[in-house]
Image (tube, rainbow, N blue to C red):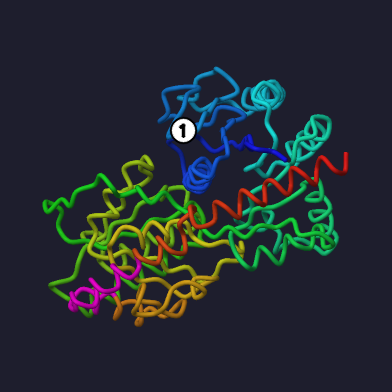
């Protein structure tokens, strides 16, 4: 019996300051640490996303981390140089896996080369091989039947899976249908995300939207709904603040044209991409938070929605994906059908004019996060899952 599990999470996502992936894995690694597991993070190669980190190795909140290469990540690198350092990082990680006497690896990465590289290495080292999947394989919905089957075959290199939703649990259970190797870990976030932020009354009232560099967040729908809302609220309407890399958004020209054509330029503030540690202050000081996806074909659950709910700011969201598994309308958020611009606008106005409802929703939402999206709630069962994967790997070798 293993008394202390030593677990390495291998990723390209930066640490400790990073992106939504960093938020996800940091939340459960901290909980695993409190559960008696010794976690560490190995970052394969430099990434421009990691430019806000000053150290190449260290300990953060009890979690040891190390970037596998010593090259600075403060500048964007040529593809060939990145590829060389990527390969160096892969091979260098073997040394640290052995040095730290790792029992299991969680791969938070989706490159096929890395899949097979670590499959071979971990088989030799008798280390359990697990991956964290918050989505379907990239582009899976548009693949032919043959390519889908090939993708599932590729996934057979893993001993186990950590997945975010019920939908993904069903999908990844198809990889090894004869054994229980899938652990459902709902979206989890850092519960201290807003702990040290104070309300700043110098901000004029605004509605905030955080979006990624894809169209699945429904930013166009958010802007159109905001236009409808302004027509209802008129002179008392709040501003709209957009946070994300707007210029890389596939739909940005369409959105910009809508803003100009409907005379919204003076009311829509496009902040652009901000360091991830600056975003909580903008979320925390908003009067309302908005997210309007039409669907989640990725099978995932939006991490940003968890942050929205944790902030104590009332939320208006479209009822897409598995949001309805956890949130109830007018209890945890104002939930509206996707594409219902009028319904979204009316919900925004209702929260603005009914402060009692807004306060009730924000309080209930925060309680929901501590109950459903708190990694500590799953730490014991996740630890048992890791242990079962380790023991299974050692039994078959």
* Residue 212 place in picture, x, y as percent: 46, 53
Report how many numbered discs are placed on residues in the image.
1
**369 above or below 31?**
below
* Residue 134 place in picture, x, y as percent: 60, 55
Residue in the foreground of this view, choosing between 80 and 105: 105
Tell me where residue 232 sits by quadrant: bottom left
* Residue 97 place in picture, x, y as percent: 68, 27
Q: SS class of the residue under badge 1?
A: loop
Left or right of 78 in this view: 370: left
Where does the magenta region start and end?
A: 348-365
Tell me, yes or no, whether the highlighted magenta stretch contains residue 360.
Answer: yes
Residue 10 visible in image: no
Query: Image point 29% across, 81% down: which residue?
Result: 346
Looking at the image, which residue sits at the far right?
397
Query: Image point 11% across, 51% down: which residue?
Result: 202
**On the rendered image, what quadrant is the N terminus found in?**
top right
Residue in the foreground of this view, choosing between 370 and 290: 370
Can you identify the residue that label 1 sits on?
Answer: 62
Query: Image point 54% across, 18% down: which residue?
Result: 71
Left or right of 144 in this view: 28: left
Tell me, yes or no, whether the highlighted magenta stretch contains residue 327.
Answer: no
* Residue 165 place in picture, x, y as percent: 59, 64
Residue 182 visible in image: yes
């Amino acid at each position: 019996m293993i008394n202390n599990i030593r677990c390495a999470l291998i990723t390209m996502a930066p640490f400790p300051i990073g992106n939504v992936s960093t938020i996800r894995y940091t939340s459960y690694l901290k909980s695993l640490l409190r559960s008696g597991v010794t976690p560490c993070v190995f970052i394969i190669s430099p990434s421009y996303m990691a430019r806000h980190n000053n150290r190449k190795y260290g300990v953060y909140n009890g979690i040891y981390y190390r970037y596998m290469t010593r090259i600075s990540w403060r500048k964007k690198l040529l593809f060939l140089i990145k590829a060389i350092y990527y390969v160096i990082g892969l091979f260098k990680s073997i040394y640290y896996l052995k040095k730290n006497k790792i029992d299991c690896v969680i791969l938070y990465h989706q490159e096929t080369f890395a899949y097979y590289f670590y499959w071979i290495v971990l088989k030799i080292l008798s280390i359990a091989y697990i991956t964290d999947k918050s989505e379907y394989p990239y582009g899976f919905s548009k693949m032919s039947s043959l390519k889908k089957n090939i993708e599932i075959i590729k996934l057979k290199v893993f001993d186990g899976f950590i997945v975010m939703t019920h939908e993904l649990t069903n999908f990844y259970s198809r990889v090894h249908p004869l054994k229980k190797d899938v652990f459902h870990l709902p979206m989890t976030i850092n519960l201290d995300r807003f702990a040290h932020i104070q309300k700043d009354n110098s901000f004029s009232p605004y509605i905030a939207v955080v979006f990624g560099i894809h169209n699945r967040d429904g930013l166009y729908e958010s802007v159109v709904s905001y236009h409808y809302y302004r027509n209802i609220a008129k002179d008392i309407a709040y501003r709209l603040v957009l946070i994300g890399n707007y210029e890389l958004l596939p739909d940005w020209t369409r959105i910009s044209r809508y803003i100009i054509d409907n005379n919204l330029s003076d009311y829509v503030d496009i902040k652009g991409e901000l360091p991830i540690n600056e975003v909580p202050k903008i979320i925390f000081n908003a009067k309302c938070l908005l997210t309007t996806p039409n669907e989640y074909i990725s099978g995932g659950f939006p991490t940003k929605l968890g942050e929205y709910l944790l902030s104590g700011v009332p939320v208006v969201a479209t009822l897409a994906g598995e949001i309805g598994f956890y949130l109830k309308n007018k209890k945890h958020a104002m939930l509206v059908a996707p594409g219902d611009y009028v319904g979204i606008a009316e919900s925004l106005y209702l929260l603005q004019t009914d402060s009692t409802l807004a306060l009730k929703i924000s309080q209930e939402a925060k309680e929901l996060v501590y109950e459903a999206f708190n990694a500590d709630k799953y730490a014991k069962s996740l630890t048992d899952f890791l242990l079962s994967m380790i023991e299974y790997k050692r039994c078959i070798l």
